[in-house]
Image (tube, grey):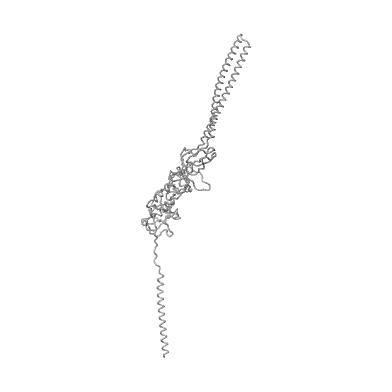
Amino acid sequence: MRFLRRSLVGLFMFAVTLGLLAYAGDAVYAALKVRWAVSDMVPPARERVFAVNVVRADMQDVAPVLTAFGELRSRRMLDIRARVAGTVVELSDGFEDGGQVQAGQLLFRVDPADAQAALDVARADLAEAEAEQRDALRAVALARDDLAAAEEQARLRTQALTRQTSLKTKGFGSDAAVEDAELAAASARQSVLSRRQALATAQGRVDQADTQHDRAVIKLAEAERRLADTALYAGFDGTLSNVNLVEGGLVANNEQVAQLIDPTDLEVSFRVSTPQYLRLLDATGALLRADVTATLDAYGADLTAEGAITRESAAVGEGQTGRLLFARLDPAAGFRPGDFVRVDVREPLLRDVFVLPAGAIDAAVTILVVDADDRLVQMPVELLRRQGDMVIVRAEGLNGREIVAERQPLLGDGIKVRPIRRAQAADAPAAPETIELTPERRAMLIAFVRDNQFMPDEAKERVLAQLALDRVPAHVVERLESRMGG
């Protein structure tokens, strides 16, 4: 009985255990079903809103600026060459590289002894030719008088012949007297011919004397020119360059000894592409006299000069493209021929256009416009110019609307945005225009400027004056330190 009772108790406990396990499994399964049901529910989707910087597009008239680079050159350059060969006996004090000379100033003189001797000989030859000319004129006068006398004698002989002939006709003369008169008249006529020939010879002598006189005058002028060529004078105010002459040195004929440059009469030559060149033509195809500004980077103190385009090159150089243009510059201190400058050309005015940030336009030449519901609308535009980080476009219906200033890959047509306008972005602190320098930093910058051999004196003075201020312009410090490697 005890065995049966224990068996029943064990069976009961086994059944209770199975029931509890079944109940626990059912509870776990119910919990899993609830969890599975919750995970299958899709939460409601929310539209993503992007914050974008926007700018207002205002229609305006803009004169685009074309930027190129070119080289300065002087419009007046003169090669100084020796006109005669010889020894240099006199040299101007300012005849050296960088020497300033004035128009009409003596530059150098070659030994004039040989030229002076040739001039004296030419003068003597001229005096001899003038004497021969006077003798020939006197000979002509005498020949004319001799001819007049012979003609008078021939006239008398002819009258005597006429008289003898008349007497013979009347019976009072003889044949012998008539023959003698005829012979005398013939001899007188022959004498007239001889005198005429003598007069022609005298006149030919006059012509020869005139020719010799002209030759003597030409030789005298040539001798005077050769003597004048021994002294060379400056043709205009300018600066000497490439001087290779010393006093006492020998020079050959037509040898180049220096170069005279006018540093105040400058022009800049620069090359532009063919599309840029076409924008500088008027309706007739002529080149516009557009205004230009030449800028020389002078270590923080940029040198600028205004000017205008004057002409273009007649042909494209071998291996070159585009067009070579020339612009004459107004006088400006600090510029020198050979400087490499940036040239800004003001193009003709574009009317009814928009100036937008360059990041607002994509490769398909479209922009994104914010509509009244703060959604983006894609709009095509006509790209006219690129000006640094700005673009000039033309579009219909864009005036007064807000556009996205910076395109992003996530932005597109119909996307909801939160515009950030310029007034909201203006709260950021602006970069300071001037800064204070420590004594060590100021001394380092001043030493760099003073030791720089490539900076013009005018630029040095301007930069040093700025560095002496309590607060120095920030862009000047930044540019100097970038060249120092700091």
Picture coordinates of residue 461 (x, y %)?
41, 48
Of all residues, the one furthest to the bottom in this rendering is 1
| Residue situated in front as seen by the camera: 10 or 273 | 273
Picture coordinates of residue 105 (x, y %)?
47, 38
Residue 311 in the figure: left or right of residue 430: right
Does residue 309 sit above or below 182 in this rendering?
Answer: below
Picture coordinates of residue 223 (x, y %)?
53, 33
| Residue situated in front as seen by the camera: 158 or 478 | 478
Number of numbered discs on residues: 0
Q: Quadrant of the C terminus?
A: bottom left
Does residue 148 sit above or below 356 in this rendering?
Answer: above
Does residue 321 sit above or below 226 in this rendering?
Answer: below
Residue 376 position by quadrant: bottom left
Residue 108 in the figure: left or right of residue 13: right
Of all residues, the one furthest to the right in this rendering is 176
Picture coordinates of residue 393 (x, y %)?
42, 51
Residue 56 position by quadrant: bottom left
| Residue situated in front as seen by the camera: 165 or 11 | 165
Q: Quadrant of the N terminus?
A: bottom left
Residue 332 position by quadrant: top left
| Residue situated in front as seen by the camera: 399 or 185 | 185
